[in-house]
Amino acid sequence: MQATEFIANWQTSGECERANFQLLLIGLCDLLGADPGCAHRTTSAPAS
């Protein structure tokens, strides 16, 4: 995906970024070449 495609896709979203934040972040990760995989805890302590 190119930056222009990403911008064009979300420019017409009608401010639905919050409702579709997962798709937005996956697309952004794709654009940046980052792995959109899940985050892993670095500690065994329970989340608070």
Image: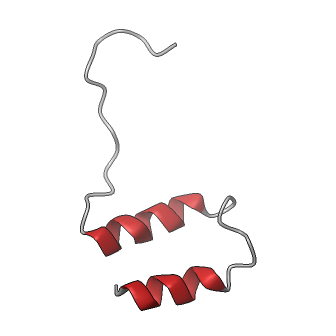
Q: Nearer the viewer, residue 6 or 37?
A: 6
Residue most extreme to the right = 14
In the figure, 46 relative to 27: above or below? above
- At x 35%, y 64%, the residue is 29
- At x 51%, y 83%, the residue is 7
Residue most extreme to the top = 45
User: In which quadrant is the N terminus drawn?
Assistant: bottom left
In the figure, 5 relative to 39: above or below? below
- At x 39%, y 84%, the residue is 3
> Residue 37: x, y in percent?
31, 51
> Residue 27: x, y in percent?
42, 71
Displayed quadrant of residue 43: top left
Please indicate whether residue 16 sits to the left or right of residue 44 in the image: right
Total number of numbered discs in the rendering: 0
- At x 25%, y 23%, the residue is 42
> Residue 17: x, y in percent?
65, 65
Displayed quadrant of residue 44: top left
Colour scheme in use: secondary structure
> Residue 20: x, y in percent?
62, 64
Please indicate whether residue 15 sits to the left or right of residue 22 in the image: right
In the figure, 12 relative to 47: above or below? below
In the figure, 2 relative to 40: above or below? below
Please indicate whether residue 33 sits to the left or right of residue 15 in the image: left
